[in-house]
Image (tube, grey):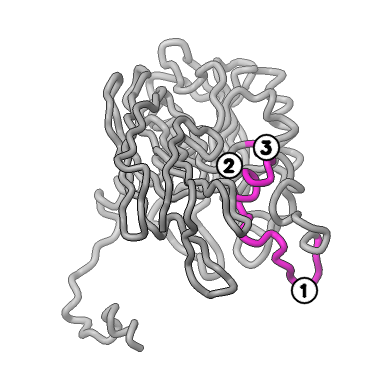
């Protein structure tokens, strides 16, 4: 009841400001959110962004190219005022510049839109997916297309990891587009054509195979029965993969850019801190490429020695910085006592143990660029 009062549930409706829907500001924000969420997983040979000087024909194929994905079901049911499908966004942006066709063999570049939709057995609420793999017909489409055109990009429209073992070594470029909402088509086109430099990072780990995931920690956790055992404990996501030294397909925090970033000059203000102190440090990020781009600088911390089992490293902060070519920015972090703590089940308290810790700064959980040590004295 207290929360209901705090959020204004019992306020006089006449005092509420009038709302708005589908304004130009809403549309711009929807597109920007979709753009910033798209993750460039792989880009061999810098095939992306599309070179408009050399690419005159693009083949656009695949089941999710001409499909709307914003219509959920059950509690996630919604009715957006409009939705731009991938094929629509591409046709609009390529108009008069690049011809959109359907034949990979006749194209300079092929875009395969693969993935799932909101339906039983795929990405939907109320149940798990039936398979970790793409539908067989999509795998066959990718394999067949690669024989016709080696310059092939796979764009995945899905909300969760997908097995790529049948084709990942053959496809030069993979883009994770998620379910991008009503501006998805425009956002995807902007990324592919280089109007927007991708800056999204994976919020989860893509395993090479399902048996590598923490759900397979023990025989009683998978396939399991009606009784659930949480044998993985705190070792879920990247904590599982990194601590168990299991190589993922794409690690947590991974995401490429059309430019390059250099990490340098890690400066730690005080390498010995006590309980009420704040550890401050900085790192310089340089855009060493040729395009404007944004980098998400990630801070992980490792407890060198602990009386309880802890992950090999834990994410404790991140900063996103946008830089012009050649530009440098000093990114600053602060580490508090709580960032070093774990929950002690025996005392029901958060505990930060005395000892040595390591700062790990990188572009993903597996791409650590700089390291620095400090001591916590309690």
Q: Nearer the viewer, mark 3 or mark 2?
A: 3
Q: Which residues are magenta?
A: 223-249
**Badge number at residue 378:** none
Residue 133, how many percent across, how many down? 72, 44
Report if the CB atoms under discs 3 and 2 are less than 8 Å apart: no
* Residue at the (31%, 45%) spot, across then down: 280
Residue shown at the point (40%, 48%) measured from the top left: 317
Asked whether the viewer can see residue 185, the reply is no
- Classify 118 as above or below 92: below
Q: Relative to 107, is 330 above or below?
A: below
Q: Residue 32 location, x and y as percent?
A: 34, 43
Alpha carbon separation for disc pair 3 and 2: 29 Å
For disc 1, the marked residue is 227
Alpha-carbon distance for marks 2 and 1? 37 Å
Q: Is residue 329 visible?
A: yes
State the CA–CA distance, disc 1 to disc 3.
Answer: 30 Å
Mark 2: give few (<14), some (14-19) or many (20+) Cα within 10 Å.
Answer: many
Residue under numbered circle 3: 247
Q: Residue at x 71, y 31 (%)?
A: 141
Query: Dot 3: within a 10 Å radius of its alpha carbon, few (fewer than 14), some, or many (20 or more) residues?
Result: some
Position of 201 with respect to 126 (left or right) is left
């Amino acid at each position: 009841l207290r929360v209901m009062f705090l959020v204004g549930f019992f306020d006089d409706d006449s005092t509420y400001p009038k709302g708005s829907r589908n304004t130009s500001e809403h549309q711009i924000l929807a597109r920007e959110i979709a753009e910033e969420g798209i993750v460039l997983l792989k880009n061999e040979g810098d095939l992306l962004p599309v070179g408009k000087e050399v690419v005159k024909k693009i083949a656009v194929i695949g089941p999710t190219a001409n499909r709307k994905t914003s219509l959920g079901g059950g509690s996630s049911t919604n009715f957006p005022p409009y939705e731009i499908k991938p094929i629509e966004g591409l046709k609009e942006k390529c108009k008069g510049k690049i011809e959109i066709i359907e034949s990979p063999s006749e194209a300079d570049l092929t875009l395969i839109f693969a993935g799932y939709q909101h339906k039983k057995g795929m990405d939907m609420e109320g149940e798990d997916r039936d398979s970790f793999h793409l539908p067989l017909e999509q795998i066959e489409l990718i394999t067949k297309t690669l024989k016709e055109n080696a310059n092939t990009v796979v764009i995945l429209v899905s909300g969760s990891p997908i097995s790529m073992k049948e084709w990942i070594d053959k496809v030069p470029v993979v883009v994770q587009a998620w379910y991008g909402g009503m501006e998805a088509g425009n956002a995807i086109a902007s990324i592919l054509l280089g109007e927007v430099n991708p800056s999204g990072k994976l919020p989860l780990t893509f395993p090479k195979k399902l048996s590598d995931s923490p759900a397979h920690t023990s025989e009683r956790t998978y396939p399991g029965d009606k009784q659930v055992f949480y044998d993985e404990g705190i070792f879920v996501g990247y904590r599982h993969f990194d601590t168990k030294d299991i190589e993922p397909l794409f690690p947590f925090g991974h995401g490429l850019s059309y430019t390059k970033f250099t990490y340098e000059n890690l400066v730690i203000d005080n390498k010995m801190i006590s309980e009420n102190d704040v550890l401050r440090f900085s790192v310089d990020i340089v855009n060493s490429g040729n395009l404007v781009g944004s980098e998400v600088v990630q801070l992980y911390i490792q407890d060198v020695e602990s009386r309880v089992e802890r992950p090999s490293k834990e994410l404790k902060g991140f900063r996103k910085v946008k830089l012009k070519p050649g530009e440098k920015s000093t990114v600053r972090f602060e580490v508090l006592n709580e960032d070093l703590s774990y929950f002690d089940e025996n005392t029901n308290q958060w505990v930060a143990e005395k000892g040595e810790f390591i700062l790990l700064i990188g572009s993903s959980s597996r791409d650590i660029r700089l390291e620095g040590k400090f001591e916590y004295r309690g």
